[in-house]
Amino acid sequence: MIDEGRPLFLQIAEAIEDSIVDGTLSEDAQAPSTNELAAFYRINPATAAKGVAMLTDKGVLIKRRGIGMFGAVGARDILLRERRTVFADRFIDPLLAEARTLGLDADDLAALLRERAANGAPTALTEGNRA
């Protein structure tokens, strides 16, 4: 799981976010403690705490004094909204720009997406095998 090129606290935060999005960590369920995260990933507890603090600041986790950290009510919705925005910025906006360059309108794009989805869009692995 650890990617040497990215800050560890971000990776911890993203792992917890993934758990919330996929339902592994439900709203109002107790999140792993910073000590548990530190032991599991073999990192400094302060690093794990920094990732957890990010999620608390974002409103995804809430602290219950003396008990621990818990998934906030509405956390999944917060994360899905954020991820949709990032998805649009990273993929949809460049797609639309290229479509404009090619003279494709929204209907053309929708038809292309439906066609690719129906035929099983090629993956990077299958594309590489075609060469």
Image: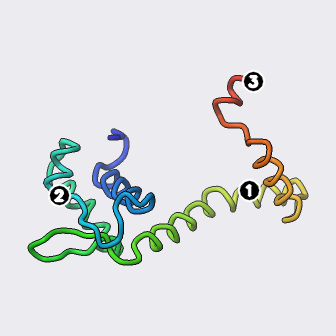
Labels 3 and 2: the sequence-earlier one? 2
Residue 16 on image: x %, y %: 33, 58
Give the distance between the C-alpha atoms of the residues marked 3 and 2, in whole angstroms: 46 Å
| In the depicted structure, whether residue 94 falls above or below residue 79 | above
List the residue tagged with mark 2. Answer: 34
**Which residue is depicted at the point 47% across and 73% down?**
77
- What kind of residue is marked 1? Leu
State if disc 1 and disc 3 touch (CB < 8 Å): no
Residue occupied by mark 1: 95
- CA separation in Å, label 3 and label 1: 24 Å
* Quarter of the image where one finds residue 122: top right
Cβ–Cβ below 8 Å for labels 3 and 2?
no
Q: Secondary structure at mark 3?
A: helix
Amino acid under disc 2: Thr
Q: Tag count in the figure?
A: 3
| 81 displayed left or right of 52 | right
Q: Is residue 80 left or right of residue 70?
A: right
Circle 1 crowding by C-alpha within 10 Å: few under 14, some 14–19, many from 20: some
Provide residue 57's location: percent of width, then percent of height: 30, 74
Q: Residue at x 18, y 59 (%)?
A: 33
Q: Which mark is residue 130?
A: 3
